Image (tube, helix red, strand yellow):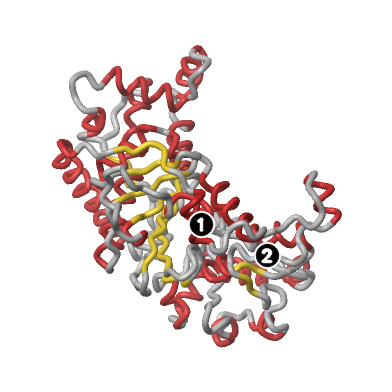
Amino acid sequence: MWMDHRAASQVDRINGTQHSVLSYVGEVMSVEMQPPKLLWMKENLRESCWEKAGYFFDLPDFLSWKATGVTARSLCPLVCKWTYSPDKGWDDSFWKVIGLEDLVADKYEKIGNQILSPGASVGNGLTPEAAKDLGLVEGTAVAASLIDAHAGGLGVIGADVKGHNLPCENHPVTSRLAVICGTSSCHMGISDAPIFMPGVWGPYYSAMVPGFWLNEGGQSATGKLIDHVVRGHVAFPELQAKAAARSAQNIYTYLNSHLDLIKKSLPVGFLTVDLHVWPDFHGNRSPLADLTLKGMVVGLTLYQGLDELALIYLATIQAIALGTRHILETMQFAGHHISTLFLCGGLSKNPLFVQMHADITGKPIVLSKEVESVLVGAAILGACASGDFASVQEAMERMGKIGKIVQPNHRDKRFYDKKYEVFLKLVEHQREYKAIMQGV
């Protein structure tokens, strides 16, 4: 449901209130957050859903409720997506001004009035029914959860980097940015003190790593965008057939090898010198926080073969990496000091995606030894709930392990600086076009 944008008018009204809680979501609430979705439900499904609902859950809290029978909520989703404050609690005035005063009247029972820190034990552990369904032992500890991307961040950001000659070595964990790349991408940076910046969510206190403030940038469609571009191309059936003929390869491994064939003597990234993509096919989450932005492609030809499919695939990956650079620069300008990227998620399995992020941001990239870092984060929480570690910080340092390190090709810096200049021009031009067409 996070990717459902039907509550666009509701979020516009919420942002129009300019309520003080919005300063903790980058000044502009996203349509992907819960208040606009709840408001849409109340206005469109009042009798069939809103008035009959007992509770509203984020998915991780729903799962812990199903496992334990306890309705306690985790601090993480409530702070990141529901406007809860760790020190002040819920703000009654916000819910009243946006038209969801019903939630205040029941003392927030439907959305959470018992809040636990991530990693805290929930209730008495697995119920007999849940234990039977899962094939586990009744009473097995269940931890207060993290949102999936935040679990991925927890699983990578604290890993021991000693002896790897990385710029973040002998520096605090605040010099690292965790990038969780899947259907969408989330950019998690932590700090000792709150850092406020337009267009980047947060600061959220203790929402991922206890004791640290979290800022969360993001791109609403990354893996989804690559799939959309590749599968919608006229040459996709040919790609499928050729990848299938090499039974050990998926379509993206095949595309990467095809790019190597056509690059000749050039670095592969240079193939898109006159092909540019603005990647906001599903609006911009960060750092522009503009739901109305659209995707753009400049440099198309009449050719429709596999070469052209490979090129638009490459240009799309570069556009996503350029978007990460845009978010990174915004965070650094606001006060973050980031030297190293830690990538995880499905897209981190694609070496082209990883190398483009290194080359375009100019930062070394650390990949986790355990590719499924979201599961590592979940295991860290479970280990804390069962008492195996005294703190989340201790657990993440002990359980997070480094795998591969990818260095940027600094020789290509000038090319990617120019690509980035074009990238920023694209959105500037899109806004000019919109201004021209206003009032038609």
In screen coordinates, is 300 left or right of 90?
A: left
Q: How crowded is mark 1: few (under 14 residues within 10 Å), some or many (20 or more)?
A: many
Q: Which three-letter amino acid code belongs to the residue tagged 1?
A: His
In the foreground, 16 or 400: 400
User: Where is mark 2, residue-wise?
Assistant: 121
Q: Residues within 10 Å of mark 2 (few under 14, many from 20)?
A: many
Q: Where is residue 256 in the image (x, y as percent from the top left)?
A: 37, 25
Residue plotted at (55% across, 66% down): 76
User: Where is mark 1, residue-wise?
Assistant: 150
Q: Which three-letter amino acid code belongs to the residue tagged 2?
A: Ser
Q: How far apart are marks 1 and 2 (CA)?
A: 18 Å
In the foreground, 99 or 364: 364
Mark 1 against mark 2, which lies toward the viewer?
A: 2
The image quarter containing residue 405 is top left
Q: Position of residue 401 (x, y in %)?
A: 45, 44
Depicted 229 relative to depicted 72: above or below: above
Tell me if I can see residue 67 in this picture.
Answer: yes
Tell me if I can see residue 319 in this picture.
Answer: no
Residue plotted at (21% across, 43% down): 419
Q: Position of residue 79 (x, y in %)?
A: 53, 71
Residue plotted at (67% across, 58% down): 386
Which circle's residue, 1 or 2, is located before the other in the chain?
2
Q: Position of residue 431 (x, y in %)?
A: 29, 59
Q: What element carries label 1?
A: helix
Q: Quarter of the image for the C terminus: give it.
A: bottom left
Tally the numbered discs: 2
Depicted 166 relative to depicted 71: above or below: above
Q: Quarter of the image for the N terminus: give it.
A: bottom right
Q: What element carries label 2?
A: loop
In screen coordinates, is 93 left or right of 111?
A: left
